[in-house]
């Protein structure tokens, strides 16, 4: 046995966009154990349900995360709609799907940039984030906001997208697809990128299942699990299959996310092509009573919303189990026996969102 | 759409019921806790997108076994519930001894001392 050293990693670290602390137990340069500590950005958003009524809480839910903001609002609204038995208009379902898939694009592009930054490929970081700006521009044009949109509401959506704007979005997607193809080529074929990702942080299919891995982390290990196949929003009317890989390493996780970006573009195109006419919202009256578990596929994986309502304006409980929280055990496992130099890459390949995790 | 089942069980049946689900191929989705008059724990499991929820009503004094021997990754949920709600979950491995979250208030979601 070599010398054992404990290296504190985070909460402030150049590679961490958000604070998480890990005590890395090392034997020479090899990690033998990682002990996490979170809570640096715990905001008590679940607790806030005691002081905000169920309509107001939509705005709180959207603030759980600045990247999946729309999907958090959507998950919360879907829970309340399920409890109240409300069926939202078809057009609202398609609009929600468009914004959800753009959020996936936004998240994955941001992640690609951070990954490139972590292994020192600055121009690739810049190209990825440049492309992300296109997505933010679409958000701004369709919702008025670039980070928090406040377009999702209980019963549907607050804003419609005009036909001309939808056609413009198709043009944006064509342009983005061309640029993304070039960037994807570098991520998948460049030898320096491969050196940092191939064979690093391998997670077998069995281990991924036993550790409760989710989203791209699980799919890169061969688990065909994607909550969108349940058919919520407009997904039941769209043609798609979960993107999987079998290698289970950091390279496979990059490949899966790249595949999901092209898939997101295809899903948005399908939505625009099939967009039904009609209302975008149904009126909701009364207060919810009952409880419901809603699950949907965020960019980082399955998110679970548990809402318990007592028939008044104030809910008894809102519980959010985010994908990053569920992926922490898998991360801790992949860190074992890795080199200290690979720790930043491994942390990034689960695409951690600590803001979501701590709520 | 997938189905959702909610079943109330006693704390003493937790390990046996969880083991049955594990053998049937279920994945543990989450452990959730709600505190109103009693502590209400819900263990959620998924198989082919169908959700089975096991509900346990308990208090902060009664010991509740960790399901870590069946689902190893339950430790994170159990540490969180122990720390935020004060539920007396025993045998958590690894047990972070109320240091997972860096919060100044003890059991902020549970009974305040």
Image: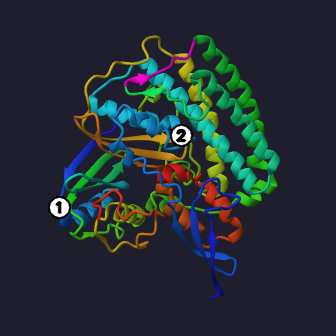
Quarter that holds the N terminus of chain B: top left
Over which residues does the magenta segment extend?
A: A155-162
Distance Cα–Cα, label 2 vs label 1: 37 Å
Main structural element of the magenta stretch: helix, strand or loop? loop
Quarter of the image holding residue A179? Answer: top right
- Asked whether residue A241 appears in the rendered view, the answer is no
Q: Chain of mark 1?
A: B
- Per the image, label 1 sits on a secondary structure element best described as loop
Quarter that holds the C terminus of chain B: bottom left
Q: Residues within 10 Å of mark 2 (few under 14, many from 20)?
A: many
Vertical placement of A335 versus B55: above or below? below
The label number, if any, that marks residue A324 in the structure image: none
Give the total number of marks visible in the rendering: 2
The residue lying at 47 percent from left, 14 percent from top is: A276
Q: Chain of mark 2?
A: A
Are marks 2 and 1 in one subunit?
Answer: no
Vertical placement of A123 versus A27: above or below? above
Vertical placement of A137 versus B43: above or below? above
Q: Which residue is mark 2?
A: A68
Q: Which residue is mark 1?
A: B10
The residue at the far front in this view is B113
Q: Provide residue A161's location: percent of width, then percent of height.
A: 55, 17
- Per the image, label 2 sits on a secondary structure element best described as loop
Task: Judge whether residue A119 is colored magenta.
Answer: no
Q: Provide residue A65's location: percent of width, then percent of height.
A: 53, 43
Residue closest to the eye, B16 or A20:
A20
Colour style of the rendered protein structure: rainbow
Vertical placement of A139 versus B6: above or below? above
Comparing labels 2 and 1, the label whose residue is closer to the camera:
2
Residue closest to the eye, A124 or B27:
A124
């Amino acid at each position: 046995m070599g010398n054992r050293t404990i290296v504190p990693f985070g909460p402030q670290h150049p590679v961490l966009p958000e604070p998480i602390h890990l005590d890395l137990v090392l034997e020479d340069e090899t990690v033998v154990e990682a002990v996490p500590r979170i809570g640096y950005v715990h905001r008590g958003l679940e607790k806030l349900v005691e002081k905000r009524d169920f309509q107001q809480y939509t705005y709180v839910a959207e603030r759980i995360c600045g990247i999946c903001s729309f999907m958090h609002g959507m998950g919360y609204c879907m829970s309340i709609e399920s409890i109240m038995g409300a069926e939202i208009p078809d057009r609202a379902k398609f609009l929600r799907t468009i914004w959800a898939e753009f959020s996936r694009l936004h998240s994955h592009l941001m992640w690609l940039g951070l990954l490139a930054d972590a292994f020192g490929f600055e121009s690739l970081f810049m190209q990825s984030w440049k492309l992300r700006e296109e997505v933010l521009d679409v958000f701004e044009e369709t919702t008025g906001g670039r980070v928090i949109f406040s377009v999702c509401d209980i019963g549907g959506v607050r804003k419609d997208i005009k036909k001309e704007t939808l056609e413009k979005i198709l043009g944006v997607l064509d342009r983005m697809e061309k640029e993304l193809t070039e960037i994807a080529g570098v991520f998948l074929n460049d030898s320096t990128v491969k050196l940092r990702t191939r064979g690093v942080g391998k997670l077998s299919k069995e281990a991924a299942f036993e550790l409760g891995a989710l989203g791209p982390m699980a799919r890169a290990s061969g688990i065909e699990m994607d909550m969108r196949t349940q058919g919520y929003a407009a997904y039941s009317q769209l043609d798609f299959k979960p993107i999987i890989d079998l290698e289970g390493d950091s390279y496979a996780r990059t490949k899966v996310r790249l595949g999901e970006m092209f898939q997101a573009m295809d899903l948005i195109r399908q939505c625009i092509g099939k967009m039904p006419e009609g209302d975008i919202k149904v009126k909701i009256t009364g207060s919810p009573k009952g409880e419901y578990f809603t699950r949907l596929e965020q960019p980082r994986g399955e998110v679970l919303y548990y809402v318990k309502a007592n028939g008044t304006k104030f809910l008894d409980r809102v519980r959010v189990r985010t994908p990053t929280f569920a992926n922490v055990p898998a991360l801790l496992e992949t860190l074992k026996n890795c080199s200290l130099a690979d720790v930043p890459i491994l942390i990034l390949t689960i695409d951690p969102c600590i803001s979501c995790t701590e709520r | 759409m997938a189905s959702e089942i909610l079943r109330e069980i006693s704390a003493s049946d937790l390990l046996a019921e969880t083991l049955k689900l594990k053998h049937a191929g279920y994945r543990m989705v989450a452990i959730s806790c709600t505190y109103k008059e009693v502590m209400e724990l819900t263990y959620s499991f998924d198989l082919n997108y169908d959700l089975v929820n096991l509900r346990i009503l308990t208090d902060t004094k009664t010991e509740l076994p960790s399901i870590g021997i069946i689902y190893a990754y339950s430790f994170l949920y159990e540490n969180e519930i122990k720390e935020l709600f004060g539920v007396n979950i025993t045998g958590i491995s690894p047990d972070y001894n109320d240091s997972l979250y860096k919060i100044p208030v003890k059991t902020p979601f549970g009974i305040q001392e």
